[in-house]
Amino acid sequence: MSKREDELTWRDLITGSIVTEPGNASQYQTGTWRSQRPLFDNKKCIKCGLCYIYCPEGCIEQDAEGYFKANLFYCKGCGICARECWPEAITMIEEEE
Amino acid sequence: MSKKEGIEVSLAVAEAAKLANVDVVAAYPITPQTHIVEHLAELVADGELDAAYIPVESEHSAMSACCGSSAAGARTFTATAGQGLELMHEVMYVASAMQLPIVMAVANRALSAPLSVWGDHSDVMAVRDTGWIQIFAENGQEAVDNVLCAFRIGEDRRVLLPVMVHLDGFNLSHVIEAIVFPEQSEVDQFIPPYQHPLPLNPDKPVTMGAFGPPFIYTEAKKAQEVNLRAAKEVVLECWNEFGKRFKRYYSPVERYRSEDANVLLLTMGSFSETAMTAIDKMRGKGQKVGLVRLRLWRPFPFGELRQAVRNADTLIVLDRALSFGGPGGPVCSEVRSALYLEEKKPKVIGFVGGLGGRDITPAGFEKMITRGIEISQKGSEEEFEMFGVRE
C-alpha cells in the first residue's frame, strides 16, 4: 500500500475490509499502549532467557553478547518480564522518567 | 414452463433455496421456521439437493458456520425466527461487515417473555442495524420470489451483502398457498454462479475480520454504509429483471389505491393483504383511503416513501414491534424521520399492534384508520397508541 495506514480513506478499503497482505500485523505499533517500560540491568542478568520466554508480545530479543532487551515498538509495558526475572535484573520504570 | 403447486409456504421457501442450488445450509430449528430447515434436511438426505447440511448446536453456531462457508465461496442459506435470530445477533454484524452474501429466511416471531412462538416483528427490529439487506414478503409467492432475488442481489459483485427475507410466522410460514415455481433452467439463468472476489483459499491466504484500530474503524463503517445504500440500485435492477422474466413485479414501496387518498395506512408483511380488504370496504363507503406497503426495509427507500405519501393529509403507520420507552414503533419512528424535512408531508400517526400473534381483521383495520383520522384531527398527548389493547 502506498498510503500510510492512518491516511487511508474509506474508498481505499477493499471488499469486507479484507487484508490481502500476510503478516502486516507487524506494522501495528502496540508500544504506544505502554505507560511503563522495562529497564534491563546486565550486571544482574544471568542470561537465563525467562523474560524472552514469558513475554506475551514476543518482543524481547537477545543481543550478540547474550543479553536481552525489549523492542519498544511492540512492548506494551505489561511487566511480566520484570515479575518473572528472579535475579531481579529487570525493573519497570514510568515512561515519563 | 413454470409449475403451480399447492404447498405450505415454509416448504416452498426450502424449495426456493433448492432451486437456487445452495451449497451449504447451516441451521437450527425453531418455531415457526422449523419446516423450512426440516424440508431442506430432507432434500439433502434424499439426494435431491447436492448440498452440505450442517446441523449445528445453536443459532449462534448456525450463523458462524454460514459465515465460514460463504467466505469459502459457497452459496449459503439459513433460516431462523424470534429467539433464534437474537442468538445470531452478534454474528450477523460480522456477516455484513465481512461482506458475506448469506441468504436467510426469517419467519418473524415475537420475543420472550412472556414466551410467545407467534408472529410479530420484534425479532426483525432488534436486528435492524446489523447491516443486512431486508425484504418483507406479504404472501408465500413473494417469499419464494424474493429468496431467489436475494441470492442474485446479495451475491452481485457490486453488493456482496447478506440478505434477510422476512415472512410472518404462521400467517405465512404455516399456510398452504398456490405457488408458482420457475423452471430450474430459468433460475439458473437468473442467478449467476457465486464468486466471491477474495474467498478463503489456502493457496492465496487472506485475513477476514481483522481487528480495526481507531484509525481505520470509522472508514470501515463508512464504506459499509455507502455499500448498503448503493445496494438499492441493484435491488431495483434485480426486481426489474425478475419482472421481465417471471411477470411478477416488486418495488421498495408498493401502493394500493393510494393515488387520490387523503388518508394512507402503512403496513409491512402479511397484514398488508388484510389491510387491502379494509381499504376496499372503506372505499366502498366513499372514503378516500389507501395503503402503502414497505417492502424494502434496508436499505430504507427514502425517496420512494416520500413520493408515495406526499399528497396525503394523514399517514397511519402500524408497527408490529414496540421500542420500549421510545417513540413507539420503529417503522413509524423512521417514517417520521424520513418526512421531517419535507415541506409537504402528512401528519404521521403511530399504532403498535398485532403483537405476539394477535390478529388484526379487516374490521380491525377499519377501526384503526377511523381512530387514526380522529387523532389526526383532534391531536393526542401520546406518541403512539397500542391497537386493540384491553384497557
Image (tube, rainbow, N blue to C red):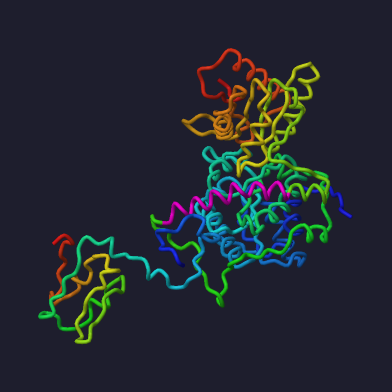
Which of the image's four quarters has the C terminus of chain B? top right
Q: Nearer the viewer, residue A89 or B270?
A: A89
Majority secondary structure in the magenta region: helix
Q: Residue furthest right?
A: B1
Q: Position of residue B5 (x, y in %)?
A: 85, 49
Magenta part of the protein: which range? B216-238
Vertical placement of B328 versus B216: above or below? Answer: above
Residue at (63, 25) in percent of width and height? B316
Q: Residue furthest top?
A: B378
Residue at (77, 65) in percent of width and height? B48
Q: Position of residue A78 (x, y in %)?
A: 24, 65
The image quadrant of residue B22 is bottom right
Q: Position of residue B210 (x, y in %)?
A: 46, 63
Q: So how many labels did they put on this image?
A: 0
Q: Residue furthest front?
A: A2
The image quadrant of residue B292 is top right
Vertical placement of B188 versus A66: above or below? Answer: above
Q: Nearer the viewer, residue B355 or B200?
A: B200
- Specify whether residue B123 is painted magenta: no
Which of the image's four quarters has the N terminus of chain B? bottom right
Q: Residue furthest bottom?
A: A65
- Specify whether residue B224 is painted magenta: yes
Q: Is residue B231 left or right of residue B322?
A: right
Q: Nearer the viewer, residue B133 or B81?
A: B133
Q: Is residue B94 left or right of residue A67?
A: right
Residue at (59, 17) in percent of width and height? B375
The image quadrant of residue B202 is bottom right
Q: Position of residue B193 (x, y in %)?
A: 71, 64
